[in-house]
């Protein structure tokens, strides 16, 4: 998936996270928007963090795309009873959760292309080998949007 596709699917996941948190209400619109924007940013973070000024400092799709790391962050945020004690928790918690879910979404959409992602060991990747990166972006964004919309509609 290319950068625009990752942004779009990350933002869509941010909508899902905002829905899960009950933030798509008039009284919590700021937190909802922050959650969606965090998903948008998390959707490209695994690639963006790999290079500084165009030069890679780490091998592409290794630690930055390591599933256990992103999964641990998301699960910790979902089950941690202390998340409410974060500074400015009403805004920081949705930002962190949206970011983590956006990052996980990035991994999901990198998995089908030939390079794959590291599932267990951070330097050993697995690929579904379904299509080359960027080939199915539009249909994936539409399908992801439809899937998250159906969940969002049933919860609101
Ligand atoms: Zn990636």
Image (cartoon, rainbow, N blue to C red):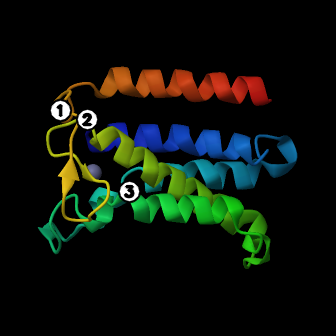
Q: Is residue 104 above or below residue 112?
A: below
**Is the residue at mark 1 in contact range of ligand 1, meaning its CB lies under 8 Å from it?**
no
Quadrant of image for the C terminus: top right
Counting from the top left corner in percent of width and height, residue 150 is at 64, 22
Judging by the rendered image, the residue that carries numbered circle 2 is 112
Judging by the rendered image, the residue that carries numbered circle 1 is 129
User: Can the viewer see residue 127 in this picture?
Assistant: yes
Residue 153 versus residue 104: which sits nearer the camera?
104
Q: Is residue 37 above or below residue 150?
A: below
Cα separation between marks 2 and 1: 5 Å
Residue 115 versus residue 142: which sits nearer the camera?
115
Counting from the top left corner in percent of width and height, residue 126 is at 22, 47
Q: Which residue occupies 48% across, 58% down?
A: 71
Q: Which residue occupies 17% across, 32% down?
A: 129
Quadrant of residue 19 within the rendered picture: top right
- Say which element carries label 2: loop
Question: In the displayed structure, does residue 28 sit left or right of residue 142?
Answer: right
- Neighbours of disc 1 within 10 Å: few (<14), some (14-19), many (20+): few
Cα separation between marks 1 and 3: 18 Å
Counting from the top left corner in percent of width and height, residue 79 is at 70, 62
Question: In the displayed structure, does residue 34 sit left or right of residue 120?
Answer: right
Contact between marks 2 and 3 (CB within 8 A): the answer is: no
**Is the residue at mark 3 in contact range of ligand 1, meaning its CB lies under 8 Å from it?**
no
Q: Which mark is residue 19?
A: none
Q: Earlier in the sequence, mark 2 or mark 1?
A: 2
Judging by the rendered image, the residue that carries numbered circle 3 is 67
Q: Earlier in the sequence, mark 2 or mark 3?
A: 3
């Amino acid at each position: 998936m290319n950068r625009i596709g990752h942004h779009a699917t990350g933002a869509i996941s941010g909508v899902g996270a905002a829905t899960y948190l009950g933030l798509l209400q008039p009284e919590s619109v700021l937190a909802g928007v922050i959650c969606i924007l965090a998903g948008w940013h998390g959707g490209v973070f695994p690639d963006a963090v790999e290079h500084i000024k165009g030069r890679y400092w780490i091998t592409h799709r290794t630690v930055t795309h390591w599933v256990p790391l992103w999964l641990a962050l998301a699960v910790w945020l979902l089950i941690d009873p202390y998340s409410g004690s974060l500074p400015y928790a009403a805004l920081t918690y949705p930002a962190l959760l949206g970011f983590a879910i956006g990052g996980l979404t990035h991994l999901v959409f990198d998995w089908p292309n030939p390079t794959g992602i590291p599932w267990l060991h951070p330097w050993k990747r697995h690929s579904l080998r379904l299509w080359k990166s960027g080939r199915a972006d539009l249909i994936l964004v539409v399908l992801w949007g439809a899937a998250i919309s159906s969940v969002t509609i049933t919860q609101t």
